[in-house]
Each structure stands twice: as C-alpha cells, then as structure tokens.
C-alpha cells in the first residue's frame, strides 16, 4: 500500500492531483573509518534512499601470517564500548560466519582472536502521531461570482519508527603477536518498527556481508 492515500473532495470547483579492494590496511580506531555520512537525510516520514542497503568494506594485511586465516581455533572478544555484548545476537551471528569461514570458535589453543564492536546511531527520531484527516478551505472570486473549495486528505499510514544506523566492526589478530591480519566493517540503516529488519535479521545480514568474500578484501 502506498504510504499516502489522498482523497480530495471539491465543492464548487474540485480538482485532483497526484503528483574494491583496498591495497593497504587502514589504521583507524574503533570510531572509524567513518560511515557514509548521515548529515543529509530525507525529512521525517519520508523514506531515506539509503534505508535497508548494507554497506561493507574489508581489508587484508600484507603479512605472511594471513596464510593462516580461515583455519584452526579462534577466540571471539567484544571490543571496548561494545553495545551488543549483552544481547548475544551479534556474537552468535559472528560465530556462525566464522564456522563457515573454516574456523573453530572457542577451540583449544587458538592462534587468532577476532575483536568486534557494534554501534548504533539515531539518524531520525520516530515520526510523531498525526491526524488521519487533514484539510483546508479556500475562497475565491471572479467575474462570475465567488466560490469555495474544500480539500480533505485522508492519511491512513502509520507513523514511521526511528531510523537507526547499525554498524559492526571486526578485527582478526594473531593471538601471540597481536599483529592485525584482517579487518572490516558493515552497516545498514533501518526503521525500528520495520518487520523486515528485526535485530536478529540485522545481525545476520551484517555479519554475512562482512565475511562474504573472507579473507579476500572487498568494498561496496
């Protein structure tokens, strides 16, 4: 159903109108690299063109130790200021992707450690409740007398939930030397009340995108 259903009723005069891989490992803190830039968004109530689009970048170090990626035991560690450590959704989704990549999460004598951080940023607040019926009255005069127009708009849409950007960053290090071997980040913007983007869906989609080409670097 279209978000707006308008029905205009005219009295006198009525009218209707509808009108790639990066060659070098970046050295960023947990706050970077920056996201796509959230300063310019659509007005509240309108669909942002970036909504529901997963963006991902991964980087591979130039080190002989990268040959050990995707094999053996690995430790999963939540990074500083991690917001997802309590719900366990991202850690479970991350463990599933590591298994697909060839790792044994939680196995004995781990040679590598994956650190991850999940952050959420409010892009737009929830749309406030609105009246389902809106309208206006216009009066005009001409050579043949005066007339009055009445316009009524019926809005059956529900207020849109908050628009939130969710981002996961992950880094894989050699456990013994702490050398950074691989890192990446994935993010998506979604409405809080969107049934297609429940928290477990977001966790699965972001971690899946992050390890889609692992360990090969990717961007998109």
Image (tube, grey):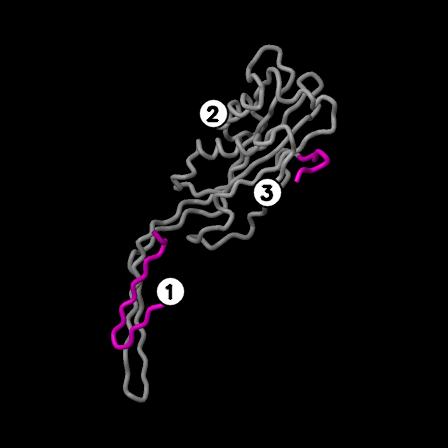
The dot on residue 18 is: 1
Magenta span main SS: loop
Q: Quadrant of residue 197?
A: top left
The stretch drawn in magenta includes residue 92: no
Instruction: Name the residue at 54% across, 38% down.
Output: 187
The stretch drawn in magenta includes residue 15: yes
- Residue 180 at x, y = what percent? 69, 26
Left or right: residue 24 versus residue 194 is right
Which one is nearer the viewer's eye here, 220 or 35? Answer: 220
Q: Residues within 10 Å of mark 1 (few under 14, many from 20)?
A: few
Dot 1 or dot 3, earlier in sequence: 1
Q: Residues within 10 Å of mark 3 (few under 14, many from 20)?
A: some
Dot 1 or dot 2, earlier in sequence: 1
Distance of label 3 from label 2 (alpha carbons): 24 Å
Q: Quadrant of residue 57?
A: top right
Q: Which residue is mark 2?
A: 88
- Residue 116 at x, y = what percent? 58, 28
User: Quadrant where the C terminus lies?
Assistant: top right
Identify whether 190 is placed above or below 178. below
Dot 3 or dot 2, earlier in sequence: 3
Instruction: Name the residue at 60% across, 25% down.
Output: 115
- Residue 111 at x, y = what percent? 65, 16
- Residue 184 at x, y = what percent? 62, 33
Q: Closer to the camera: disc 1 or disc 2?
A: 1
Instruction: Name the residue at 43% across, 43% down.
Output: 191
Identify the element where label 1 is drawn.
Answer: loop
Identify whether 49 is placed above or below 197. below
Q: Which residue is mark 3?
A: 35
Q: Which residues are magenta?
A: 1-28
Left or right: residue 205 versus residue 37 is left
């Amino acid at each position: 159903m279209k978000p707006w259903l308008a029905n205009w009723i005219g009295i006198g005069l009525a009218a209707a109108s509808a009108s790639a891989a990066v060659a070098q490992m970046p050295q960023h803190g947990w706050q970077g690299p920056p996201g796509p830039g959230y300063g310019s968004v659509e007005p509240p109530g309108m669909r942002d063109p970036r909504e529901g689009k997963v963006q991902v970048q991964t980087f591979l170090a130039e080190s002989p130790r990268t040959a050990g990626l995707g094999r053996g035991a690995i430790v999963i560690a939540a990074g500083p200021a991690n917001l997802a450590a309590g719900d366990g959704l991202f850690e479970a989704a991350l463990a599933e992707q590591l298994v697909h990549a060839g790792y044994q999460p939680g196995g004995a004598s781990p040679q590598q450690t994956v650190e991850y951080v999940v952050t959420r940023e409010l892009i737009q607040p929830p749309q406030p409740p609105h009246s389902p019926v809106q309208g206006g009255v216009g009066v005009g005069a001409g050579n043949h007398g005066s007339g009055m127009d009445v316009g009524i708009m019926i809005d059956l849409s529900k207020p849109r939930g908050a628009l939130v950007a969710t981002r996961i960053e992950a880094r894989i290090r050699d456990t013994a030397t702490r050398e950074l071997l691989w890192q990446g980040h994935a993010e998506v913007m979604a409405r809080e009340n969107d049934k297609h983007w429940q928290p477990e869906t977001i966790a699965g989609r972001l971690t899946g995108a992050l390890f889609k080409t692992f360990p090969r670097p990717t961007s998109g």
